[in-house]
Amino acid sequence: MASEKQSPVAVVMGSDSDMAIMTACVQQLGEFGVEPVVRILSAHRTPDEAAQFADNAPKNGIKVVIAAAGMAAHLAGALAGRLRLPVIGVPLDSGGGLGGIDSLLSTVQMPPGVPVATVAIGKAGAKNAAILAVQILALSDEALAKKLANFKDAQRKKVIEKDAGIQ
């Protein structure tokens, strides 16, 4: 059993091969000053450990779970079924020829009452999952809300600069 560091965000992935993409999520969180708990847990290969993680998440201070998986991609849904916390699913391309569409459908098609907020497939989705988690936390964290406002303003300024550059 892994020891749990305290963080409001957990980034959970189904395999160590997912880390290549999910590093973008962890780095994006870090840019906001959020150092997440990072775990490798499988809905299929370690269901008991995944359940134990979910059951202990609230008492470990976790407020938002980001779950990434490829292929059948049941990790986000399996965690959401045990949690009352927001779960953000990141579908991944497992390289099996379907381009991550299988993972997207497995993550987004949840039954009523068990929502998983689902972002895009891959690295862009990993970054957006981090930003969505920060947006959720910023609702009750004024310092994080200011960092988020600065981030959004910087994005706006970049677009304005690019537009001015082509005029």
Image: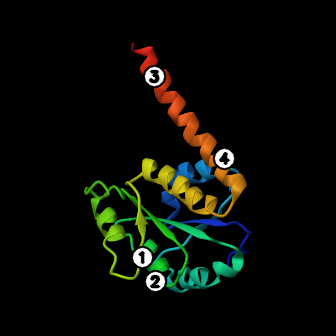
Q: Quadrant of the C terminus?
A: top left
Q: Secondary structure at mark 4?
A: helix
Residue 38 position within the rendered picture, expressed as x and y whole percent measured from the top left: 62, 64
- Disc nearer the start of the sequence (1/3): 1
- Disc nearer the start of the sequence (4/1): 1
Give the Cα separation between the discs numbered 4 and 1: 30 Å
Q: Which residue is mark 2?
A: 81
Give the Cα separation between the discs numbered 3 and 2: 44 Å
Q: Secondary structure at mark 2?
A: loop
Give the Cα separation between the discs numbered 3 and 4: 23 Å
Q: Toward the viewer: 120 or 16?
A: 120
Q: Which residue of the protein is positioned furthest toward the top in this rendering?
A: 167
Above or below for 9 versus 19? below
Residue at 28% of width from left, 64% of height from top?
Answer: 102
Residue 79 position within the rendered picture, expressed as x and y whole percent measured from the top left: 49, 78
Residue at 72% of width from left, 53% of height from top?
Answer: 143
Left-right relation of 160 to 10: left
State if disc 3 and disc 1 touch (CB < 8 Å): no
Name which residue type carries label 4: Lys
Name which residue type carries label 2: Gly
State if disc 4 and disc 3 touch (CB < 8 Å): no
Q: Which residue is mark 4?
A: 147
Left-right relation of 154 to 75: right
Left-right relation of 106 to 17: left
